[in-house]
Image (cartoon, rainbow, N blue to C red):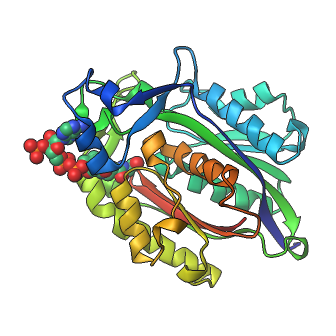
Amino acid sequence: MKDIRSIVRGAGAYLPARTMTNKDLTKIVDTDDEWIVQRTGIRERHIAAEGEYTSDIATAAARAAIENAGLTPADIDLIVLATATPDYTFPATAVTVQERLGIEQGTAFDLHAVCSGFVFAVTTADNYLRCGKFKRALVIGAETFSRILDWNDRTTCVLFGDGGGAIVLEAVDVAEAHGRGVLASRLRSDGRHRDKLFVDGGPSTTQTAGHLRMEGKEVFRHAVSLLSDVIEGTLDDAGVSADAVDWFVPHQANQRIISATAKKFGWPDEKVVSTVGQHGNTSAASIPLALDVAIRDGRIKQGDLVMIEALGGGFTWGAALIRW
Ligand code: UT7
């Protein structure tokens, strides 16, 4: 078998037009800007318009990524869409995106690992590409968490937002990759934690979509050590030291989790891409949304070493190291 690397060809993102500030939330639940900013770092989030679905957000992000890669939809033969808020129970939202992009070749499927979805999707696509099954993969994280929030529950509704981001991964001969590509990744899950962050509905149980429920303090308590563990493992697998990492692009759930994790690896604020203030927690979309911001403002450049990580419902968690 040829030695293949999955390199990043392009990236893109999409945010719904409507923003909701912390002040707007004070009209809905008993909360205040100071509490939300101090405990989470979140200042505002985007909320999908009525009739705007996860597939619309994913398709817009995918189009931007394909264009940024200098490709056309005809070049894509794999779509992996990470989402916990699909349009429908089935078919997979990925096939709607496939149809909307006019892609008739290859395959498309959804991947469900909640907030860790993008890291799982990158790893899944990378494995398919490296085994020679597909040539170019669209890896998307897209969510409409506003639809599964209990807007009477101040402990959760202030935390989340909607949006989507995507990257295009391409299989190239390792000799032509010039060191670029997905270098290593680690994925974990532990179902013993599944009742700490879950949705209380579903087709097989309640026949409803349900609402998000979270024991925030419990999730927080585990987050930094579990994330540090997979980051360390990923660095080890790649044979790279923490100092060599140029950009830390974590899941955007809470600024305190982001800062504490970065501190463990000696990454200063200047190396940390944080968008939690503007986007809130957009689950599987948060990493590709943050990547897009840092690419467009000139921080992440070709050849940079980028560490992504996330933890979410399940728990699921993981990290991946990419030479951009
Ligand atoms: O993406 C998936 C992974 N998710 C996460 O990583 C989330 C992890 N958890 C967290 O980020 C934090 O635990 C939260 C931001 C959710 C909560 O922060 P905390 O420092 O753990 O606060 P807490 O839950 O201990 O609540 C402290 C107080 C409580 O009042 P009492 O019981 O001390 O009187 C809450 O009732 O803050 C109160 N509170 C609020 N006050 C104003 C909870 N939510 C709010 C609110 N506004 N929105």
On-image quarter of the N terminus: bottom right
Quarter where residue 302 is shown? bottom right
Q: Residue at image x 77%, y 70%?
A: 180
Q: Please identify the residue farthest to the top as the structure is shown.
A: 50
Across and down, in percent, residue 5 comes to 80, 68
Q: Is residue 246 left or right of residue 39?
A: right
Residue 124 appears in which quarter of the rendering?
A: bottom right
> Residue lying farthest left?
30
* Quarter of the figure that contains the C terminus: bottom right
Residue 81 image offset from top left, x and y in percent: 64, 41
- Asked if residue 58 can be seen in this view, the reply is yes
Q: Nearer the viewer, residue 62 or 94?
A: 62
Q: From the viewer's side, name the closer residue of 117 and 166.
A: 166
Residue depicted at 38% across the width and 40% down the height: 43
Residue 261 appears at what percent x and percent y? Answer: 40, 68
Please state if 174 lies on the left or on the right of 245 as rendered: right
120 versus 26 height, above or below: below
Residue 200 vertical position relative to residue 186 in the rendered view, above or below? above
Q: How many marks?
A: 0
Comparing 173 with 154, the one in front is 154
From this viewpoint, is residue 313 visible?
no
Give the camera-side residue of 43 and 108: 43
Question: Which residue is at a point 53% across and 58% down the rendered structure image?
Answer: 273
Q: Is 22 left, or right, of 17 in this rendering?
A: left
Q: Is residue 211 above or below residue 51?
A: below
Give the image quarter of residue 32: top left
Percent position of residue 272, x then y = 51, 63
Left or right of 19 on screen, residue 68: right
